[in-house]
């Protein structure tokens, strides 16, 4: 199914006087475990990124099969949190969540130096605003087709919610919540609010079918409707609109944009694929025998070193 909903929170930092990107700053949906296609008939690249995180998956691709299996063995020992010699579905889910969280905080770390201008280990709203909206603040373009002031107000509101101690400065955890609100429980109301503001065009506090479809696709006059739209209409009526009143309220919208079972679904998939004796748990041997499902390996000579933990 083609999904045209994209995660549109984009930070465009060029210099200390940068211009914000001309895109909505909302988060439509939870960041996927991988942006790659999940098709095991072609490859296991999606599973590699879900299991390892994007950066580590790329690093494993540069290893020999032998080194890849050795390092996977180290990971298996870490996944077995209760040290019973098996990896359960819950332990798999916890590991996948950990890998995704690490990817998020690596992203925060990468961007930190661009915003912490005075190097005091916190990012103030003023620092963020001046870096992101510097050129607009210097020369407000009243006739601009894009409303930067609206975007800035929205981001300030989200920043204040992420700022749990109310000092208008964000430490790394608070900045992660600002950049990735979909990953933090206390930010979910903000994600829903932004989504409702963008999609609820008639302002009635709900998302009806017309608004739901209209956010994904705007048909030109005489244009043939894409086939996937009928599938989305069916999903709206059967899955999204849980109380069958013809529209999505805030709770139903939250279930749509922030599903809670991504890690569970992937853990279940990996378990089913690798569980040779069908006992609903994985031994180290079962995982290593299916190492190509969990991790990648594309070269014949060792050529890339990961972190010291390996």
Image (tube, rainbow, N blue to C red):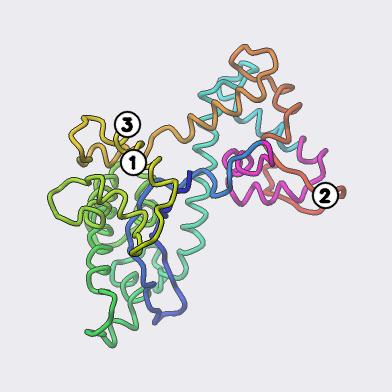
Label 3 or label 2, whichever comes before in sequence order: 3
Foreground mark, 3 or 2, reads: 3
Instruction: Check if mark 3's residue and mark 1's residue have beta carbons within 8 Å.
Output: no
In the rendered view, would you say 17 is above or below 256?
A: below
Please give the residue where the numbered disc 2 appears in the rendered image. Answer: 299
Label 3 or label 1, whichever comes before in sequence order: 1
Q: Residues within 10 Å of mark 2 (few under 14, many from 20)?
A: few
Can you name the residue that lies furthest to the left here? 204
Please give the residue where the numbered disc 1 appears in the rendered image. Answer: 233
Tell me: 56 left or right of 17: right
Q: Where is residue 172 in the image (x, y as percent from the top left)?
A: 40, 55
Q: Where is residue 96 in the image (x, y as percent from the top left)?
A: 54, 36
User: Alpha carbon of mark 3 to alpha carbon of mark 1: how far?
Assistant: 9 Å
In the rendered view, would you say 310 is above or below 165?
A: above
Q: Position of residue 161 (x, y in %)?
A: 24, 53
Front residue of 268 and 230:
230
Foreground mark, 1 or 2, reads: 1
Instruction: Check if mark 1's residue and mark 2's residue have beta carbons within 8 Å.
Output: no
Q: Quadrant of residue 135?
A: bottom left
Q: Which residue does the image show at 14% across and 54% down from the upper left?
A: 203
Please give the residue where the numbered disc 3 appears in the rendered image. Answer: 238
Q: Is mark 2 on a helix, strand or loop?
A: loop
In the rendered view, would you say 141 is above or below 12?
A: below
Front residue of 193 and 114:
193
Tell me: 96 left or right of 246: right
Label 1 or label 2, whichever comes before in sequence order: 1
Q: Provide the residue span drawn in magenta.
A: 41-69
Q: Which residue does the image show at 26% across and 31% down from the upper left?
A: 242
Can you name the residue that lies furthest to the front here? 222
Q: What element carries label 3?
A: helix
């Amino acid at each position: 199914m083609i999904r045209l909903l994209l995660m549109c929170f984009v930070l465009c930092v060029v210099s200390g006087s940068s211009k914000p990107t001309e895109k909505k700053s909302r988060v439509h949906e939870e960041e996927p475990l991988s942006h790659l296609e999940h098709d095991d008939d072609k490859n296991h690249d999606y599973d590699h990124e879900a299991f390892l995180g994007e950066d580590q998956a790329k690093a494993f691709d540069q290893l020999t099969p032998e080194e890849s299996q050795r390092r996977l063995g180290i990971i298996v020992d870490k996944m077995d949190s209760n040290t019973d010699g098996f990896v359960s579905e819950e332990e798999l889910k916890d590991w996948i969540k950990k890998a995704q969280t690490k990817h998020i905080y690596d992203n925060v770390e990468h961007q930190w130096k661009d915003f912490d201008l005075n190097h005091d280990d916190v990012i103030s709203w003023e620092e963020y605003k001046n870096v992101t909206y510097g050129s607009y603040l210097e020369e407000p373009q009243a006739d601009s087709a894009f409303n930067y002031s609206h975007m800035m107000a929205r981001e300030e509101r989200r920043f204040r919610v992420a700022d749990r101690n109310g000092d208008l400065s964000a430490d790394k955890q608070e900045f992660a919540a600002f950049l990735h609100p979909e990953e933090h429980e206390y930010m979910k109301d903000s994600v829903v609010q932004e989504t409702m503001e963008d999609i609820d065009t008639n302002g009635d506090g709900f998302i009806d079918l017309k608004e739901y479809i209209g956010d994904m696709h705007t048909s030109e006059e005489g244009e043939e409707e894409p086939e996937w739209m009928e599938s989305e209409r069916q999903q709206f009526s059967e899955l999204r609109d849980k109380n069958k009143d013809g529209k999505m309220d805030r709770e139903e919208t939250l279930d749509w944009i922030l599903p809670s079972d991504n890690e569970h679904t992937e853990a279940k998939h990996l378990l089913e694929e690798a569980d040779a004796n069908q006992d609903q748990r994985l031994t180290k041997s079962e995982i290593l025998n299916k190492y190509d499902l969990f991790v990648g390996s594309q070269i014949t000579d060792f050529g890339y070193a990961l972190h010291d933990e390996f």
